[in-house]
Image: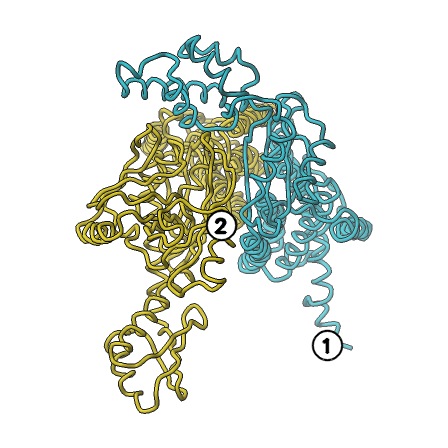
Chain colours: A cyan, B yellow
Amino acid sequence: MEFFSDTKIDFMKYRKYFVILSLALLAVGILAVFFHGKLNLGIDFAGGTQLTLKFRQQPEIDELREVVADAGIGDAQIQRFGEESANEVIIKTPTVEGQEEGTRNLVVDALSVRYESAMTGDLDLNQRGSEAIAERLYELDPDELRATDEAIAGDHYAEVAGKILERRRQEGLLVSWDEITGIPEVSTEVATALQENAYLGEFAVLGAENVGPQIGAELRLKGILAVLASLVGMMMYIWFRFELRFGVGALVALSHDVLIVLGFFTMMGFEFNLTTIAAFLTLVGYSVNDTVVVFDRVRENLRRSRRQPLVETINLSLNQTLSRTVLTSGTTLLVVGSLFVLGGDVLRGFAFILTVGVVVGTYSSIYVASPFTLLWERIFGREARLRRQEA
Amino acid sequence: MSRSLLWRGIIILAVVLLSVLAAHPLAEKLKLGLDLRGGIHLVLQVQVEDAVRSETAKDMDRLIQELQDAGIQANGSPITSSTFEVNGVPAGRDSTVDEIVGQFLPGWSWSHRGETVVFEMAPANLNEIKNLAVVQALETIRNRIDEFGVAEPVIQRQGLEGTRIVVQLPGVDDPERVKKLIKNTAFLEFRLVEYPLGGGGVRTREEIEAQYGGRLPEHLEILTGTSRDRQGVAVGQQFYLVEKRPVITGRDLKNARPGLGEFNQPVVNFYLTFEGGKLFAEATAANVGRGLAIVLDGKVASAPNIRSRIGDSGIIEGSFTRQEVEDLSTVLRSGALPAGITYLEERTVGPALGQDSIEAGLKAGLIGLVLVVLTMLVVYKGTGINAVVALILDLVILFGALSYFRATLTLPGIAGIVLTIGMAVDANVLVFERIREELRHGRTVKSAIQAGFAKALSSVMDANITTLIAALFLFQFGTGPIRGFAVTLSIGILASLFTAIFVSRWIFDLVLAGRKRVDRLSI
C-alpha cells in the first residue's frame, strides 16, 4: 500500500498561516507553563517525600489529607494511583524543615494512629520485615521446636517468615488471615500465635522516595543544562553536516516542539520529573531526526539543480520524503501510543510527551524548519547580499 | 551462492548466535534495576566537618597538655571547625610555644597576637582528614552491610574526591532497619557515674544540680537516658551525672556479640583489646560499688553498679529487643563512624510495585510490536517481511548486548526498548521508500535496490546520529533509571543500523540471487 506517491503539494504556499498557528500554540504553551497551571514539579526537582501506599479498603482522599495535615505537614498532594480496585494512593509532601531526611515516618505513624488504633498485638505483618517476624515466632515458638534444637527452630521460623513475606510481595498487602493459613509451611499453631500477637495493618508502604533540598537543586540545574546542551549539540551537528541556514531552521523547529509539548504537558497536569527530562531529550532527538531527513533530501536536490529557487527545492524534497515522514511518525506513534494506554501510571507522562511530540515534531519539520530556513535565506542569503550591495 | 553472500550470511548468523547465547536464559542474564526488582537506593552525605572538628579538639587538648608540662598555663578554645586559639601565653615564651607546636602539631599553621596564638589547619591536612573520614565511613558501612547479609550490594563513593556515598541494596524488606543500621554512629563510651554514685539515675535534672549548688564541676556533665517499663515501653527520662572523660571507648573493643543476660534478656557481650582490658580492669577495681554508665551516641543506655573488677570482657545491658541487640553488636564490631551521616536521597521500591511496572511495560511493548509488524506488512507487502526480520533481529541483538555488557534494565529502559521498536523500522522505511522511488523512475528491480540503499545511506546515518547525540546527553545527565533508558535506546539504534543496512540488504540479495531477471518486487 502506498499512501503518497508522486505528490505535488505546495507545502510552502501557506507557510505564513502555519507560522501564525505555531506562534499561537507557543503562546498557549508559555502561558500554561508560567501563568495558568504552573509546572507540576515532582520531588526529583522540588525536593520532598513521595510515598506509595496500598490500603486494604479504598481510602477517602479527603480523610487522608486531614490525617496528614494533622501530622503537621501542610501542602501535601494526595492522589489515587493505578487501577481503582488496587486501593493505592500516592502522598507527596514538600520538604519539612527539620525533616530533611523525609516525612515517611511522620506520615506512616499518623496513618497508623488513625486506621490501626483498634488493632491488638505489636507486630504489623504488612509493615515489618521477615527478620522481625521470624524473631517474634522464635520467641513464641508455637511449633515447640526450641526445646529440641534451637538452631533448627531458628531456621524453621526464618523459612516460615520468608514464605509469609513472599505472599505479601505478590500484591503488596496481606488482606486477610486466610492468605496466611493457606501457606503450606504455616502450621495451625503458627497461624494462631500470629493472630494473637500480630495484626494485619490496614496499609503497606509499597515505595518511599525522599529527595533532599540539596539534591533537588542539583538535579534542577543538571536537567536544564542537559536540555540546553542537547539543543546546542544538535545545532552544531546540523551546522557541521549541512549549512548554517539549515542549522538555524532545525534549532527553531526543535525549540518550537519542546515548548509546545511542555505547554500541553503542563496543561494536562502531569508531574515533571527525571523521566520527563528523558522524554524531552528523546523528543529533541526525534524532532531533529525528522527534520534532518528532509534537509538531507534538500541538499541532494540542490546539488542536482543549482538554478532552482530554494522554495521549489524545499517543496520538492518535502513531497519526496512525505511518505517516509508519515510512515515513521506512524510507527513511532503506534508504540508510544500503546505505552501511553498500557504502560502504567509511572510512564504515562513520558509516553504523553512522545505522543504529542511525534505529532508536533512531524508538523514542525514541514512547517517550521523549512520556512525558517527560507526566512534566513531571504535575510542573509546570497541574493539578499547582492540586493544590499546594489542598494 | 556467491562468496560475498555466504560470508555476509555467516557474519549475521554469528552475531545472532552470540546474542542468543549471551541472553539465554533471559530471566537470569538480564540484570533488573532497583526500580523493577525492588530495593533501596540511598545517597549519604558524610559530615566531614564533624571529623575535622574532633581532630581540632584532639590536637588542641594535646597542645594544652604539652604546654602545661612545659610550665605554661594556657587555655584553648575552638573558633571554627578547623581553627582554634590559645590564650594566656606569657610574654617571652613564644619560642617555647613554637618549639612545642613544631614537635607535636604538624599540619597546623599559627600566628602570635600578643598573649594569644591563633591556629589554622593547613589545607593539605584538612583535605587529608576529610578524605580519611569518607574512606573510613565507606569501610564501616561496607562492614555493616556485609554482616547484615544483602546480596549484590553497591556501596560507592560518589566521585573521587566526593563526600557522598551511594548505597544500593536490592530486595531489602525492612528498609527502615537498614537505614538505622547504616547511620548509627555507634559511638560507645564507658564513663564513671558521679551522682547517684551507685548508678541508676534520677528523675530530674534539678535534683543533680541541687547537689552542687547549681554549678557543676568542670570535669562532670549531665547525660540523659530513656527509662522503660518491663515491656520495654518508654516511660520517661533518667538523668545521670557522669565524668566527661571515658574509661574506655568503642575503639578499645575487639569483638561484640549478641547474648542473653541473667534474666534471659537480650544483651551484648563485648571483648576488649589487651590495652583496653588493662585500663578497664584498673578502673573497675578502683571503683567497686560505683555506677558505670554505658553511653551510646551521647545517651545513657544503662548505668549498672560495678560489683567487682571486670577484666577484658563484659556485657552491655539496657532495655533492648533481640533485633536491637543484634544490630548493636554489628555496629560495635564494624567500628564507629568517623563522622555523622545524613541521607540526602532515598528511593525505596517494593517488589510489588516493580512487578506491576514490568507487566505493564511488557504488554505495551508486545502490542506496539504487533502493530508495527502489521503496518510493515500492509505497507510493504513482501518486502515488509524483510523489515520484520530486521526488527526481530534488532531486538535479539539488543537483549544480547544488554546481557553481555551486564547493563541494568530499568523502567525507563523498558520504555527505551518499546520506543526502539517504533523507531528502528525508520531506517528500513527510508531505504524502502527510496527503492520505490527508483522503481518509479523506471529502474530494474536489482538496480533500484542497489540505488535505494546507496542513496538512503546518508539520510539513515544522519537520522540515527541525531538520536544517538540525544542519548549521549541523556547518559551524561542521568542517574540510575535514566541511564538505563539512554543505554537501551542507544543499543537499539546501533543495532537497527546493522539490521536495516547490512541484514536487510543481505536478505534482498539472497532472495534475488541466481535469478537472471526480476520483473516485479513486492513492495
Percent across and percent down for residue A309 are: 71, 57
The outermost residue toward the bottom is B92
Task: Tell me the residue at 74%/32% (across/down).
Answer: A62
* Other residues around mark 2 within 10 Å, as few (<14) / some (14–19) / many (≥20): some
Closer to the camera in the image, B285 or B423 = B285
Q: Amino acid at mark 1?
A: Gln
Q: Amino acid at mark 2?
A: Leu
**Any mark on residue A389, and which?**
1
In the picture provided, is A246 more to the left or to the right than A368? Answer: left
From this viewpoint, is residue B2 visible?
A: no
Percent across and percent down for residue B30 are: 40, 31
Closer to the camera in the image, B169 or A290 = B169
| Residue A301 drawn above or below residue B374 | below
Label 2 residue SS:
helix
Q: CA distance from mark 2 to mark 1?
A: 44 Å
From this viewpoint, is residue A184 visible?
A: yes
- CB under 8 Å between discs 2 and 1: no
Closer to the camera in the image, A192 or B167 = A192
Task: Tell me the residue at 46%/54% (across/down).
Answer: B208
**Any mark on residue B472, and which?**
2
Label 1 residue SS:
helix
| Image quarter in which the N terminus of chain A is found | top right
Which chain is home to disc 1?
A
* Other residues around mark 1 within 10 Å, as few (<14) / some (14–19) / many (≥20): few
